């Protein structure tokens, strides 16, 4: 993949947030026909949930999405669910405890990770 001009846009926010300035800027550039390709490390960097909606949005404006590192395709279903759960807990704990108390939010996320880790492999629901 070689491009004539590149622009790096970063966000330091939850993948669950709908107010991420970088993503909103990128969507604006797509609407203005100022971007043709979008390279992301993996799907979760664009959004934690609803990747299909954003993919359809960008495709509708002629923007191709390139996933550079397809490592998420190698995750087990259990690992994807754990990652999703941790993202949700992180997002909601941040809202619950407020921005001034990152320590409490980190404690909650750590506790959830411990519970999930202690649970080990989940039984196959199809059995």
Image (tube, rainbow, N blue to C red):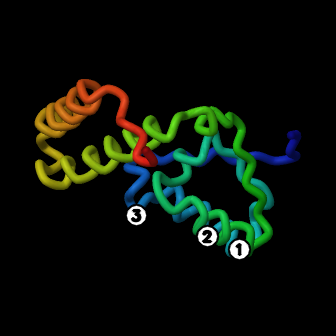
Residue 87 is situated, as x and y percent measured from the top left of the image, at: 35, 45
Mark 1–mark 2 contact, CB under 8 Å? Answer: yes
Q: Earlier in the sequence, mark 3 or mark 2?
A: 3
Rounded to the nearest angstrom, the CA distance separating label 1 from label 3 is 19 Å
**Badge 1: residue crowd in 10 Å (few <14, some 14–19, many ≥20):** few
For marks 1 and 3, the one nearer the N-term is: 3
User: In the orientation shown, which residue stands out farthest toward the front?
Assistant: 127
Residue under label 3? 19
Q: Is 38 left or right of 88, judged from the image as shown?
A: right
* Total tally of numbered discs in the picture: 3
Q: Nearer the viewer, residue 76 or 21?
A: 76
Nearer mark to the viewer, of 1 and 3: 3
- Horizontal side of residue 50 vs 60, given as left or right: left
In this figure, which residue is indicated by the disc labeled 1?
32
Tell me whether circle 3 and circle 2 mark residues in contact (CB < 8 Å). no
| Alpha carbon distance from label 1 to label 2 | 6 Å
Residue sitting at x 19%, y 55%: 95
Which residue appears at 59% of the width and 37% of the height? Answer: 72
Which residue is tagged 2?
A: 28
Q: Would you call the spot at circle 2 few (<14 residues within 10 Å), some (14-19), or many (20 or more)?
A: few
Q: Gap between marks 3 and 2, in whole Å?
A: 13 Å
What residue is at 68 percent from the left and 74 percent from the top?
Answer: 31
**Residue 113 occupies quadrant:** top left
């Amino acid at each position: 993949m070689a491009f004539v001009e590149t622009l790096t846009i970063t966000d330091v926010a939850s993948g669950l947030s709908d107010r991420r300035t970088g993503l909103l800027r990128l969507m604006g550039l797509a609407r203005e026909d100022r971007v043709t390709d979008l390279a992301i490390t993996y799907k979760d960097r664009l959004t934690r949930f609803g990747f299909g909606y954003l993919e359809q949005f960008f495709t509708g404006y002629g923007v191709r999405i390139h996933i550079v590192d397809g490592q998420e395709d190698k995750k087990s279903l259990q690992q994807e669910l754990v990652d999703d759960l941790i993202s949700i807990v992180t997002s909601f704990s941040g809202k619950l405890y407020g921005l001034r108390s990152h320590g409490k939010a980190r404690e909650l996320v750590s506790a959830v990770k411990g519970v999930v880790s202690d649970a080990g492999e989940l039984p196959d629901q199809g059995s």
